[in-house]
Amino acid sequence: MFARLRLARSRRVGPATFRRLIAEHGDATRALAALPEVAAQAGDAKYRPANEDDIRREIRAARKADAKLLTLGGPGYPSRLGEVGDAPAVLWAQGRTTLAQRRCVAIVGTRNASSLALRMTRALSRDLTEAGIVVVSGLARGVDTVAHSAALDGGTIAVHAGGLDCIYPAENADLGTQIATQGCALSERPFGLSPQARDFPRRNRIVSGLAQAVVVVEAAARSGSMITARDALDQGREVLAVPGHPLDGRASGCNMLLRDGATLVRGAEDVLEVLDRLTPPPEVALTPPAPSMQPEADTTDLRERILTLLSPVPVGEDQLLRDLSQDRPVPAPHLAAELSELELSGSIARRPGGGLVRV
């Protein structure tokens, strides 16, 4: 547990790099030992993994909060979330962690919700939980708050943007405490960390990743809920939306989703109908890639080609591999190793959804 948490907290080790390092070195202890050399090859000769004292403090805070650590590929980690390419390497969890293994639906929407949207959210959450569905949301004001409150008795999961002990917004402190005991509270962030603006989009991909389907109740065209909907589409989740009045800007995002093919929601029956069509996703294990028999590519040339192809616009890793292989085949393990070094050196970064950009 200690080694995996320390690896996940080390600078420039994101979810994809965490996966690669574990796959290449077999376990977190060996990956940590190799990390300074990997960083040095990427141009950072002074690289050091996360400070051990910081990790011990984080573990002590978790024990005080009665939280358990779930690691990617380990026991108790939500299997559905583990399928996502940028799934968190570690999660702190409080409460009934088995809820994440049941059928889950995410309900999201605007903080400044209309009365109709709140009534719709309350009815959806109540009816879905009565049907045995777990409701997932982000503990924000408005739609999220009502979704959690209405689902508290039946089963709800709150994904925090900051540490589990830094409930945001403050008015949801009591609700957050209830969810941590009656439901399940999850966060990939360390204890004591108040959420910053960048943490909310990161949280959203966990909300959608836990669910089989995402229901957007009310959302503007440019909103966090629409980010969650895009994450859901990238993750292969079903996206559903409640229609709204064309003149209400708070419903513009939902209406756009419906225009583009999202399933229209009039009540819980529409959501349950979609769920009944879906098959449960298989559990995935974190396994090392098969060894490649292809000749080793020229490292310098490959690195330059990667940087040439990347730009500020995110590109999927699969698409990058196809682009690189147009002239001559590039073994996937070689690309993975180069991406790890470039990410550690700060030359490239990953955006929510897993897209690669040049920094």
Image (tube, grey):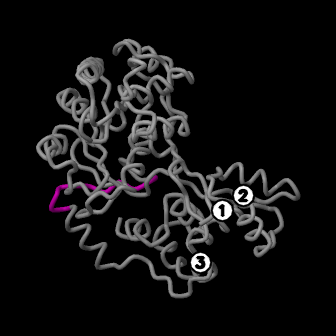
The three-letter amino acid code for the residue at tag 1 is Ala
| Above or below for 337 versus 185 | below
Picture coordinates of residue 205 (x, y %)? 44, 45
Report the span colored magenta.
Answer: 63-73
- Is residue 80 in view from this perspective? no
Query: SS for tag 1?
Result: helix
Query: SS for tag 2?
Result: helix
| Above or below for 23 versus 81 | below
Residue neighbourhood size for the residue with mark 1, other residues' Cα within 10 Å, grouped as few (<14), some (14–19), many (≥20): some
Residue holding disc 3: 38
Q: Quadrant of the N terminus?
A: bottom left
The three-letter amino acid code for the residue at tag 3 is Val
Residue holding disc 2: 332
Picture coordinates of residue 258 (x, y %)? 50, 21
Residues at marks 2 and 3, CA–CA distance in whole angstroms: 18 Å
Question: Is label 2 in contact with label 1 (beta carbons under 8 Å)?
Answer: yes
Q: Earlier in the sequence, mark 2 or mark 3?
A: 3
Residue at position x 74%, y 60% from top?
Answer: 309
Question: Quarter-wise, where is residue 339 in the image?
Answer: bottom right
